[in-house]
Image (cartoon, helix red, strand yellow):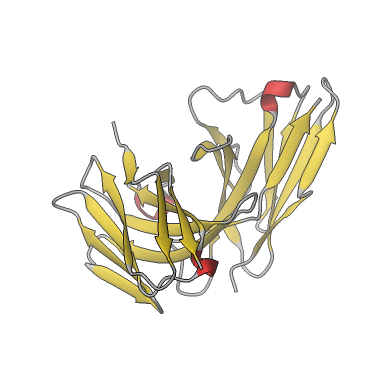
Amino acid sequence: GAVVSQHPSWVICKSGTSVKIECRSLDFQATTMFWYRQFPKQSLMLMATSNEGSKATYEQGVEKDKFLINHASLTLSTLTVTSAHPEDSSFYICSARGSASGRADEQFFGPGTRLTVL
Amino acid sequence: KQEVTQIPAALSVPEGENLVLNCSFTDSAIYNLQWFRQDPGKGLTSLLLIQSSQREQTSGRLNASLDKSSGRSTLYIAASQPGDSATYLCAVNYGGSQGNLIFGKGTKLSVKP
């Protein structure tokens, strides 16, 4: 139980285009989802927190108009990188927390999405 | 500022050795602490979660301890195997049931056959 999926697992796009990444909780309801970014040999940095049906809360320094987050249901959150640039190339990981049996305090992580912007 | 530090950054051991990975945090008022494993290019796998009221948690060959007063946690791996090679991340939750995680930079473990 407590499985989180991400799609796509990797994507290559041209500079200026937008990319959407999906995060799904497969076997539990995720009341809260988190989006992280990880640069090579660095740890995970939280970008934003989203609660189902509410606007996302962004961390300091993260542009909300560039990284659009939608958490429209208890099993799906999306991150859209708008007008992507090469510096947005990174590994994006989502996590979910919710009603997984007996594990309400834990975050369960997706497998990540490797974004490369040319 | 709430920070999480992991030492060493990298560790190489021969197969079969017992080893300890260290995690320290600046603010002892934690809600819980998690240890994760990350394989190259992959997401995170949760290994152990320790609540602030607990001293340790065990799962198979893994044992995680927590000493809030000293701001430290350790992950003990017994009888290491090449398949244990990965990066191990420590993360602290200060915010309670609605809190987020603050991650250390990880320890990259290599277990040589």
- Snapshot quadrant of residue A62: top right
| In-image side of A32 versus B24 (left or right) | right
Count of numbered circles on the image:
0
Q: In which quarter of the image is residue B65?
A: bottom left
Residue A66: in sight, yes or no? no
Going by the image, does B108 lie left or right of A66?
A: left
- Quick one: quadrant of the C terminus of chain A? top right
For the N terminus of chain A, the quadrant is bottom right
Percent x, y for residue B46?
Answer: 49, 63
The extreme bottom residue here reads B60
Q: In this view, does B107 lie to the left or right of A116?
A: left
Front residue (pair B25, B54): B25
Rendered location of residue B43, percent (x, y)? 61, 54
Q: Is residue A96 above or below residue A100?
A: above
Q: Can residue B40 be seen in this view?
A: yes
Residue depicted at x 42% and y 55%: B12
Task: Using the image as rendered, state which of residue B50 and residue A59 is in the foreground.
Answer: B50
As drawn, which residue projects farthest toward the left?
B69
Q: Residue at x 27, y 44 (%)?
A: B25
Which x, y percent locates residue B107? 42, 49
The residue shown at (51%, 37%) is A42
Judging depth in this view, the residue of A65 and A16 nearest the camera is A16
